[in-house]
Amino acid sequence: MDLTSPWVPPSEDESRTPRSSPTARSPMRCVRLLLGCTSAAELLGTVLAEGPGWITGEGSALYLLDSAGMLRLTASHGLPDWAHERYSIVDPAGDLPAAMALRLRRPYLLSPEHTSVDYPNKNAGMGTGMVAVIALPMVVDERPVGVLALALAHRGTVPRRDLDVLETIGEACAHRLSHLLDHADARIPQDPAGAPPDGAGSRPAGLAHPMLSLAVRAAGHGAFERDLVTGESYWDAAAFRVTGQPATADGSAPELDRIVHPEDLPDVQAALAESLTTGGWYRIGYRVLRGGGRVARIEETGEVMLDVHGRPVRVAGLLSDRDQGRGRDRDRDRDREHPGQQAGHQQPEEQSTPAGARTALLLALTRSLSRAVTVRDVTTAVTDVARPAFGAASIVLDLVDEGRLLPVSHTVYGGPRRTELTRLADLSENVMQHALTRSAPLFSEPGPDRGRHGPLTPASWAVLPLVASGRQVGSCLITFSAERAFGREDRTLYSAFAGILAQSLERARLYDTHHHRATELQRAMLPRTLPRLPGIASAARYLPSTEGMQIGGDWYDLLRLPDGRIGLVIGDVQGHNAEATAVMGQLRSGLRAYATDGHDPAATLARTSRLLTELDTDLFATCLFLALDPADGALTAARAGHPAPVRIADGRAVELDLPGGPPLGVDPGQPYPLTVGRLAVGETLLVYTDGLVEDREEDYDESVQRMLGGLELWARQTGPTRVGAAPALERLADLLTLNVTERRSRPDDVALLLLHRTSPLP
């Protein structure tokens, strides 16, 4: 392990892999990857490659405290050589941002107004003059490790939500570095004198703090972790001692059904299903089977961690021996004689019998599936809740489509997991079709020839036909990594689950059908492609809402106007339903007709407003209409309650000063002011609907300012003059919508239109 090795940005091919794909980014994924890094350079690289897209990378650095108590530059990206020479060592008592953050023990932010191209000049402040810079102190158990400095595509203050993400990333880096430095003596290359490289393996005196681990060990607790994406579980040595299980070489934990008392297993599965559905902290008490027929009482306390989309991805916590104490041996003797009547053990009142516990498990799974709206939601619930609750290795869902079974559950996985499920689906195609044809579940039976299965064949499995209201919906394959016998109660449980799953899938397919028709109707009302216009490059995006019917009234248009002018139109009809979509179509047609008749933008909006009042609807709409002459760049524009357009030029992004009138349909007699301006060659215009920036978790103005900061960064790093107008605009459209797609939900639909003036016409 070399803590000082440089980080090299991923190549173009590597950047297309799922690990570094922008669409795969999430704070939870970033933190999980940080906890597996092996060097400071890899930590910084992971933050830049996997962190939120508004962490720009340019001018980022990681400092570690050395044995002399100085902050030493250990990893960086985008710093000039002179900065490495002059600021490779920072005095924590100084007034540079890294020193201030460490001394104050809180993030230290510098806005673009306080940054300088003389980065990081001590007097002018740390920054690049383009974006905000934040220094995050890395502290573990009140002991400093170092400082992480990151450049951000923000203007002004950083929203509280983003600051929480940054602090979490900083804490993850701190804990991982603390662990690496604790083990640096065994893993960092030594110099001939036997000392670690200066600044890399040097550890501040007293930084290690074993009190927490010592207290956990003294209390008889063991730690565990379950990766819900891969299905892998790990225990530390203490967890094996607590449960009385033989330790494995790699720390992999045994399956729940192998250690939990059979009478308590349904309770554990039901509690786990409920916790996976809601996320957060939980506590479960149960008995485990030990060697010699002994039984011990275990308490499991942990937390289900969710990603930014609310999906459970990890469980971590502690296992404790509830029998630890003077009476432990006496209780164990009683357990040996009466394993089903352990002293002091009480089943929960609502789950006093195994049958009641299985009912509770079905209710938990039903609640999870009842929240699923689409087929993808159902498969996600099965993957996130049902699979770990059953202790299954994988679940494959096939749906009936035109008389054939087609797999659908692969879509909820990525990377190698998807490949594995694809192979499993191919392997099980015949048996899943057979179970559906017979309308009877199939279960594997343990036997002497079960050990002959191939590497892709599961050790045990259940195939469930999915039938709802007498109709064949599909088939479900549940596999397990270890052999198991399916008793009568198990078969009843899985058959009941199949009925619930079939009903959920049938309902979800009906919703998907209606939604698909509505979406197709809306997309039919939007331009399929943008016209190719001389002297102009353009790009557009549309994203439907993720709530309600997932349709709305946003639209955009790029028009050929009389006299060779070009019209940019963008609008937003109130509401997210079929009526909003229908009104949008009527407004788009009417506005296009008025504009192509030769009316200027103000007159066009006035006529369109009167048209809306004549329609049989209570809806209103916002709209923006700009007319551009590509020959000389002359602009005329009018605005009806819509967000102002943004001009991107010379590394700056500013909203145009465009006075407006009321939304369309509110006051049909109100005129709209006409604004005149100019778009120079090399300048870009952005028009958008408010769904692009509107976020329930932050102020609207802050969202707009953050978008403007990102636009300025784009203009300076990858603008049209660097990579060509058309590719640059397409990339910018993707970047603008990236922040929207990473949100937990999208209550409003999004439309945007970009236009860049490439050259004057002859």
Image (tube, helix red, strand yellow):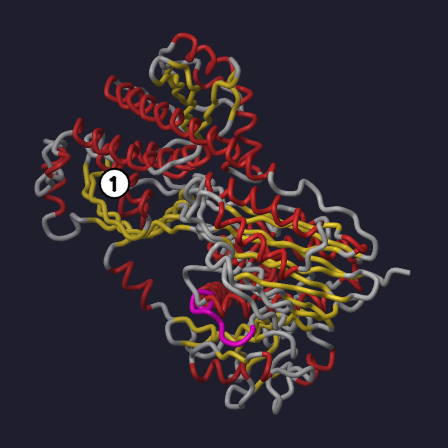
Q: Position of residue 63 (x, y in %)?
A: 57, 75
Q: Position of residue 283 (x, y in %)?
A: 23, 49
Which of the 4 image quadrants contains residue 346?
top left
Name, please, the residue furthest toward the top: 438
Name, please, the residue furthest toward the right: 762
Q: Which residue is at 43% across, 75% downward?
A: 207
Which segment did they paint magenta? 155-163
Q: Which residue is at 61% across, 76% downward?
A: 73
Taking 434 as reference, is 69 above or below it?
A: below
Q: Amino acid at mark 1?
A: Ala
Q: Is residue 354 magenta?
A: no
Q: Which residue is at 76% across, 66% downward?
A: 634
Judged left or right of residue 148, residue 217 is: left
Q: Dot 1, how many residues are within 10 Å of its Cα: few (below 14), some (14-19), or many (20+)? A: many
Judged left or right of residue 672, residue 649 is: right
Taking 616 as reference, is 120 above or below it?
A: below
Q: Is residue 179 visible?
A: no
Q: Is residue 160 magenta?
A: yes
Q: Is residue 634 visible?
A: yes
Judged left or right of residue 726, residue 433 is: left
Which of the 4 image quadrants contains residue 524?
top right
Q: Quadrant of the C terminus?
A: bottom right
Residue under numbered circle 1? 271
Q: Quadrant of the N terminus?
A: bottom right
User: Viewer-proximal residue, 484 or 449?
Assistant: 484
User: Viewer-proximal residue, 31 or 158?
Assistant: 158
Judged left or right of residue 640, residue 546 is: left
Q: Position of residue 489 (x, y in %)?
A: 23, 21
